Amino acid sequence: MAEITLRSAKEIIFGSGSRVEVGAQAALLGNHALIVCGQGSLQASGALDELRAHLEEAGVTVTVFAEVEAEPSLDTVERGREAFSAGGCDMVVAAGGGSALDVGKAIAALAPLPEPLSDFFAGAMIPGQGRPCIALPTTSGTGAEVTPNSVLTDTATGTKASIRGHALLPEIALVDPELTLSLPPDQTAFSGLDALTQAIEAYVSTGANPVSAPMSEEAVRRIAGSLRQAVQDGRNLQAREDMALGSLLAGLALASARLGLVHGLAHPLGSLYHLPHGMVCGALLPWVIEFNLPAAEGKYARLAQMAGVGESAEDLLEWVDGLVEDLGAGVDFTARGLKRDDFDRIVPYTVASGSSKHNPRPVDEQGVTELLGRLIE
């Protein structure tokens, strides 16, 4: 049997209402928390004030860094590092979608280090243990609360890539489905498609293993049964709980098994054409399933059965295609600006991507070029 590695937050707390534990948990880790969040949604929902209150009631001083954008940049992380240092902080509480969690994890990981973030953007692993980070997701999509990487963009070059290292693993993943109740339908759809993509890609990945596979299967089962309901009725707590658990399981699975060609393509396409990550993943997923059928037909058939949508790989493909369209995540890549002249920028990045290296069907320049060509036919 091949070696199996399971990477995760040191502690996972899951359950509706569990956010009230943030103060007590933080008090065990330090005295001064930097809350890292986005530029409006956490404040608008009242969740920021609630988290601050829980922390302060536990005797933890709070500084807020609410500057995370939708596609976070290296510069944003560096500003967060400055806020962490200037405030005398000793831990991070990252609350929000994948972008906020990725920035918070990066700030915590880099806080003790003298090197600039750019030193690690080319692939060098971040050393050491970093500072403690508590991650509270407010979307059910990225699984960032349990993964050892952060996806960031170098705005100078337009390059989007992951930084990696054990220091990026949160100390605590605090997953409260109630924090997702106010998420708008479009964000629910896009983040949910990201979670579904991650579960499917981890399942068919060359790194899939007896530990990751059951988590992928359960993630697909829960997401398939709840994503439409969560989009249609955001206050449906049962659907939100299933989506949150499905996303968490998908994150755990990918942290062990890695991903595939969807994510290898999604990063350059999202960066070049300014498309939401979950939308791009959803739009690409049917194309990549079809591309991978010769190498993973049996596994796709198993996922069709887990999702309750049929018995065959073709049934899964048909269901995913319909789901993407129904949720409004289909992308006309030609209308968005994709053209053959751009292939020279996209293809090498995709082939070299760590995600693509774990795709069940080998990824080469010819295959990616042909797939991109189909997107604009």
Image: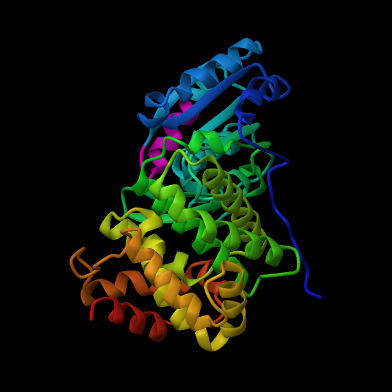
Label the magenta part by its dominant secondary structure: helix
Q: Position of residue 12 (x, y in %)?
A: 70, 40
Q: Is residue 358 magenta?
A: no
Left or right of 199: which side holds 71? left
Q: Position of residue 282 (x, y in %)?
A: 40, 63
The residue positioned 61% from the left and 48% from the top of the image is: 245
The residue positioned 76% from the left and 65% from the top of the image is: 4
Looking at the image, the residue that sits furthest to the right is 1
Q: Is residue 76 magenta?
A: yes
Place residue 373 in its image quadrant. bottom left
Judge whether residue 349 can be spotted in this image.
Answer: no
Q: Position of residue 339 (x, y in %)?
A: 21, 73
Place residue 175 in its image quadrant. top right
In this rendered view, identify the residue nearer to me: 41 or 369: 41
In this rendered view, identify the residue nearer to me: 238 or 112: 238
Question: Could you tell me which quadrant the N terminus lies in?
Answer: bottom right
Left or right of 83: which side holds 88? right
Left or right of 204: which side holds 102? left
